[in-house]
Image: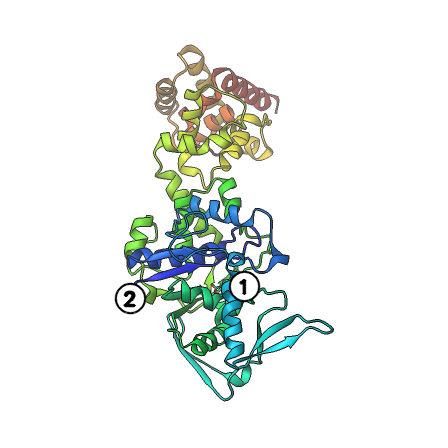
Amino acid sequence: MKEIRVRYAPSPTGLLHIGNARTALFNYLFAKHHGGKVIIRIEDTDIKRHVKGGEKSQLNDLEWLGIEFDESPQKGGPYGPYRQLERLELYQKYAHQLLEAGMASKDYKEGSEDYAIRFKVPKGKEYRFNDMVRGEMDFSSEDVEDWIILKDNGIPTYNFAVVIDDHFMKISHVLRGEEHITNTPKQIMIYQAFGWEIPLFGHMAIIVNEEKKKLSKRDKNIVQFISEYKNLGYLPEALFNFISLLGWSPSINEEILSAAEIIALFDEKRLTKAPSMFDKEKLKFINHTYLKNSEIEKLMEFLQPFLIKLPQKDSKWQKSFVELFQDRLEYGAQIISFYQEYFQDDEDLAASEIDFLKEDAIHLEVIKAFEQKLKVNEFNEENIKTALKEINKELKVRGKTLYMPTRISATHKMHGPELAKLLILLGHDKVMKNIEKTLKVLEEL
Ligand code: GLU
C-alpha cells in the first residue's frame, strides 16, 4: 500500500484556533492510526495577513496539545523546505510550464512588463471526487472562471501552491475543513493539467456554537484559542480528548479517552457530515474528569501558576487545600476563586443564612454545643468529627439540623467541601471568630 502522508497547512495569521487545532489533530490521528506520517507546512504566501510570531505560537500550542509532526520547518525532512515562501521558485517553474503548454495565459498589469499567470479552465468538464467524509461530490468546470495561479509579484495563489506542495511532498490524503470543498475542483484541475495522481480528499464538518451558527473568532461567548485554555488551566490531554470528539466519535460508548486510545480507535469512516456543536459544558466536564483523576503531586505542579498568585501558605496547607477542592475543579484558574470564596472574603452572615438559623430554636443549641466542644478539645479533624457525632447523640439532631447550623456558623457559608477538613484549613482562630459572630447575631435578634 502507498505510504500514508498527510499534512496540516496553517497560515501563520494568528493564534492557534480550536478549528485549526481540530484539523491538525485529525490529520495526526489519521496518520498515527495507519502508521503514516504527518507533516506541517506553513502557508505563508498571504503576507498581508501575517502575524508576527504566528508560526511559533501555533507550533508551541500544537506541541503542548501533544501533536507532533514528523516533518516541519524546524525538524526538516526529505521534502522541504516546509514554508511556502521558501519554495517560490518551484511554483514559478510549474506555472511557467503551464504557460508554455498553453494551459495558462499571461495577464499583464496595466502599464507594466509584469504579468500574472492565469489558468485556463477546461470547457465542459465535470470534476468528480469521492470525499472521505461527504461521499460523491461533483462540480462542473462551467462554474469556475479562469483563475490566477501566480501573481505578478511572483507569489502563487493558495489553490496552485497547495497542489504543487501536496504533490511534491507526496501527500496521500488531504483532510481539511469544509470551507475548502469548493477549492477542490480548482486543485483537481491542476493535478490533471500535470497528469499527477490526485490525493484522496476529506472535508470535515464545520464546528458550530450552541445557536448552531458557525464558530466565529468574534464570538466572545466561547473561548476559542488554545493558548487561552492553557492559561485558564485546562489540561492538554483533556483538550486533546475533547477536540477529537468534534466531528468524530469512537465506536465504543466511552468519551474519556487517552491519546493512545483515541489513536487506536480512530476511524475516518466515523467522521461526521453533520456540523459538530462546540459544547462548553462537555469540555468543562472532560477537563474536570482529568483533574479529578490526577495524582495529587502532578496536580500541585499543574496548579503552581495559580497557587503562586495566592497569599503564601506553607506547602502542607496548600496541598490539603488542593486535595479538598480537587473533585470540584473544572479548570485550574478556579482554584483562585475557591480560595477567594472560602478563605478571603470576610463576609458577614447572609440574610438567607440567618433566616435558616432562625427557622428552629434547636439551631442555636447546636451551635453553642459545637462551640463548647471546639473550645475544650484540641483543634484537629478527628475531634471535629467526634464533636459532630456527640452533638448528634446528645441533642438528638441529625441531617440538615446538625450539619447546617455547624457549617453556617463556622464558615459563614451554606455549602462547601467536607466540613472538618475545611475548618482545619480555616484555622482555629478564624473558626471560633465565625462562631462567635454567629452567636452574637442570633442572640441580638
Ligand atoms: N492554508 C490553508 C488554510 O489555512 C490550508 C488549506 C488546506 O489544507 O488545503 O486554510
Residue bearing the label numbered 1: 214
The amino acid sitting under disc 1 is Lys
| Residue 118 horizontal side relative to residue 174, left or right | right
Q: Is mark 1 within 8 Å of ligand 1?
A: no
Query: Of helix, strand and loop, which one carries label 2?
Result: loop
Residue 358 appears anywhere in the view: no
Please tell me which residue lies in front, 117 or 121.
117
Looking at the image, is 228 positioned above or below residue 245?
A: above
Looking at the image, is 96 positioned above or below residue 121?
A: above
Query: Of helix, strand and loop, which one carries label 1?
Result: loop
Residue bearing the label numbered 2: 2
The picture quadrant where one finds residue 268 is: bottom left
The picture quadrant where one finds residue 79 is: bottom left
Residue 26 appears anywhere in the view: yes
Give how far across and how far down residue 124 sits, in percent: 50, 89
Badge 2 local density, few (<14 within 10 Å), some, or many (20+)?
few
| Residue 151 horizontal side relative to residue 72, left or right | right
Badge 1 local density, few (<14 within 10 Å), some, or many (20+)?
some
Looking at the image, is 332 positioned above or below residue 281?
A: above
Q: Residue furthest left?
A: 1
